[in-house]
């Protein structure tokens, strides 16, 4: 009999247990600090659990070692994840490539996972079990909490720092001290970005379709279309989250700027074409004052911020503006610049970037360089975009480790 202890009954730990239980010689114990497993899954996708994405490619992931990671972000592994959920009876509802359970309830994903676990006699769940310490004695793992347990194999799937109230508060890294594994600095990911500007209170609460461009030291890093939320501290929303992972990592040593295109339907056109577009629009509207012209196009709070910066009067029309002011207006509309100086913390972040270096992991099995120690999910130096990529990696790491352990 091989004893396997899994610390953390979240997304990756539960899947690993199900796969490993196929081998009846394994006895698996899941230790979960909360009174029940999978608490975080309930909060995902606004309670609907966006559990995967059809565009499962390396472009949606960030790691210090993308070359290692890309070995498992493959079509074959995409099929493994999808057929795993199919085998649990989940029928997907797919919107723009985002996978949700057809029930539209995260509860469904939690329940099918726990029901499957219940069906195995060789899996035991111990809830309300906070693991405080891990040691190795005589080639066996000793796990300390409300009881002392030993195992032949140890799986750490404690999550990282994001959303500490769900149970993942970074304590997994303390457990790992025993093993001396290299880590990449951890930072909040998929979170709102902050900036200092006098106008923030004036646009607070607006949501609008834009295209965001992230520049690092004036070099374009990424463009991201979508709905931005303009807040009293900066910007939020999915398109902001998607640029946040890379941007936050650069903040300590680079100038990080986000430019907002409030006219995303005019992207990829030259300055000259933009000027022409505005000239035509202005003729069509019979040269109204600038505010009326813009109010017919954009949220009036955004118009207020732009016209205040431009210092236009009530009488100013497009035709009365100097060439310099016209250019300034077009640049405010299509390249509204925000210098980012911070971000929201782990309480508000949906994920963590950084973690245990992939150089310490056999990426095909998730076994670490420390024999019989497996690491899964967010504790590793892997973060994905919004859209099912983080759960996607958590499930996959659980499947890969569990399949190896279930052989
Ligand atoms: C609000 C929110 C919404 C999200 N929405 C999505 C989404 O729609 N799609 C998507 O792909 N991703 C989403 N994510 C991210 C995704 O949920 C995580 O990346 C994923 O759950 C990580 O899986 P994991 O197994 O590594 O860790 P977790 O799912 O965090 O599980 C870790 C488990 O370990 C337990 N634990 C920790 N320490 C100990 C200890 N010492 N002893 C015992 N137990 C311990 C915790 O209580 C927890 O149950 C969202 C995250 C948040 C916060």
Image: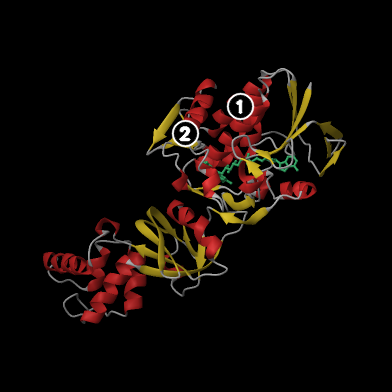
Q: Residue drawn 62% across and 30% down?
A: 15
Residue closest to the eye, 377 or 234: 377
Q: Nearer the viewer, residue 369 or 210?
A: 369
The answer to whether the residue labelled 2 contacts the one labelled 1, judged by CB atoms less than 8 Å apart, is: no
Q: Could you classify mark 2 by the number of other residues whose Cα lies within 10 Å: few (under 14), some (14-19), or many (20 or more)?
A: many
- Total labels drawn: 2
Q: Is mark 2 within 8 Å of ligand 1?
A: no
For the N terminus, which image quadrant? top right
Instruction: State how far apart marks 2 and 1 are (Cα).
Output: 15 Å
Q: Where does ligand 1 appear, by image quarter?
A: top right
**Element at badge 1?**
helix
Upstream in the sequence, badge 2 or badge 1? 2
Question: Residue 182's x, y, as percent?
Answer: 69, 52
The location of residue 364, given as percent across then percent down, is 59, 35
Residue under the point 53% across and 38% down: 72
- Residue 24's disc number: none
The dot on residue 113 is 1
Please determine whether, in this image, residue 67 is positioned above or below residue 79.
below
What is the x, y in percent for residue 21? Answer: 68, 22
Q: Which residue is mark 2?
A: 100
- Would residue 314 be seen by someone viewing this image from the given angle? no
Lateral position of residue 406 relative to residue 47, left or right: right
The C terminus - image quarter? top right
């Amino acid at each position: 009999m091989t004893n396997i202890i899994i610390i953390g009954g979240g997304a990756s730990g539960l899947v690993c247990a199900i796969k490993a239980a196929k081998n009846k010689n394994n006895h698996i114990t899941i230790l979960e600090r909360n009174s029940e497993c999978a608490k975080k899954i309930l909060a995902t996708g606004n309670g609907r659990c966006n559990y995967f994405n059809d565009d499962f490619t390396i472009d949606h992931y960030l790691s210090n070692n993308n070359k290692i990671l890309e070995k498992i972000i493959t079509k074959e592994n995409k099929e493994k994840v999808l057929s795993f959920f199919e085998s649990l009876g989940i029928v997907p509802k797919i919107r723009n490539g985002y996978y949700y359970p057809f029930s539209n309830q995260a509860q469904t994903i939690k329940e099918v996972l726990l029901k499957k676990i219940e069906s195995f006699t060789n899996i035991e769940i111990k809830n309300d079990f906070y693991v405080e310490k891990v040691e190795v004695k005589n080639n066996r793992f000793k796990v300390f909490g409300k009881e002392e347990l030993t195992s032949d194999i140890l799986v750490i799937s404690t999550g990282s720092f994001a959303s500490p109230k769900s149970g993942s508060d970074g304590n997994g890294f303390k457990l790992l001290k025993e093993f001396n594994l290299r880590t990449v600095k951890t930072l909040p990911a998929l979170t709102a970005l902050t900036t200092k500007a006098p106008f923030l209170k004036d646009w607070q609460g607006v949501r609008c379709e834009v295209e965001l461009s992230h520049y690092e030291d004036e070099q374009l890093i990424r463009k991201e279309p979508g709905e931005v939320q303009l807040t009293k501290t900066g910007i939020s929303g999915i398109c902001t989250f998607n640029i946040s992972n890379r941007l936050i990592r650069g903040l300590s040593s680079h100038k990080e700027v986000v430019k907002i295109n409030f006219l995303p339907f005019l992207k990829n056109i030259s300055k000259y074409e933009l000027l022409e577009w505005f000239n035509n629009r202005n003729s069509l509207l019979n040269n109204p004052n600038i505010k009326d012209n813009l109010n017919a196009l954009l949220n009036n709070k955004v118009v207020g911020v732009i016209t205040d910066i431009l210092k236009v009067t009530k009488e100013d029309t497009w035709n009365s503006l100097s060439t310099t002011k016209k250019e300034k207006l077009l640049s405010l509309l299509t390249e509204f610049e925000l210098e980012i100086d911070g971000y929201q913390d782990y309480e508000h972040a949906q994920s963590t970037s950084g973690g245990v270096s992939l150089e310490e992991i056999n990426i095909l099995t998730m076994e670490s360089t420390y024999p019989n120690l497996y690491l899964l999910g967010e504790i590793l130096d892997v973060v994905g975009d919004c859209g099912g990529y983080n759960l996607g990696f958590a499930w996959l790491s659980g499947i890969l480790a569990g399949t190896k352990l279930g052989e």
